[in-house]
Image: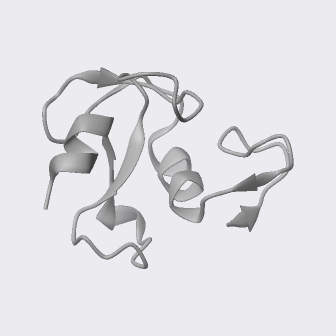
Amino acid sequence: MVKVPGHPAASKTGLALAHRVILYDKIGVGPHPCHWCGDPIQWLPRGSGPRVLGTDHLDNDPRNNDPENLVPSCHRCNCTRD
C-alpha cells in the first residue's frame, strides 16, 4: 500500500495498492481492453462486477511492479491465468 491522497486509484483514506497506481499512471482513465481476452474493462471500485479493471503481473511476480510488467486484466482472466 502507498499513500497517494487525491490519486484516482486511492481510497477515501488516500491509500492504494502500488501496482494499481503504477498501472493507472501508465494507461490512464480508460476504458481499456483486457490484455488477455479483449473485453472492455474500466477503473471501478473492487467488487463492482465483471467489468472492473484489475492489474495483472505478466511474470506472475506480485513484487515486480515495473510498469512494463503490469497490464489491465478483467477479473475472470486475472483469476484463472497461471
Q: Quadrant of residue 64?
A: bottom left
| Residue appearing at x 53%, y 45% in the figure | 24
| Residue appearing at x 35%, y 23% in the figure | 50
Would residue 11 be seen by someone viewing this image from the given angle?
yes
| Residue appearing at x 43%, y 21% in the figure | 49
Residue 70 horizontal side relative to residue 5, left or right? left
Residue 26 at what x, y percent from top left? 47, 50
| Residue appearing at x 32%, y 64% in the figure | 68
Nearer to me, 32 or 52: 52
Image quarter (top left, top right, bottom left or bottom right) of the C terminus: bottom left
Give the color scheme: rainbow, by chain, secondary structure or one colour.
one colour
Residue 4 horizontal side relative to residue 60, left or right? right
Nearer to me, 79 or 68: 79
Classify 51 as above or below 62: above
Would residue 74 be seen by someone viewing this image from the given angle?
no
Classify 36 as above or below 45: below
Classify 66 as above or below 13: below
Residue 39 at what x, y percent from top left? 21, 23
Residue 48 at what x, y percent from top left? 52, 23
Image quarter (top left, top right, bottom left or bottom right) of the N terminus: bottom right
Mark count: 0
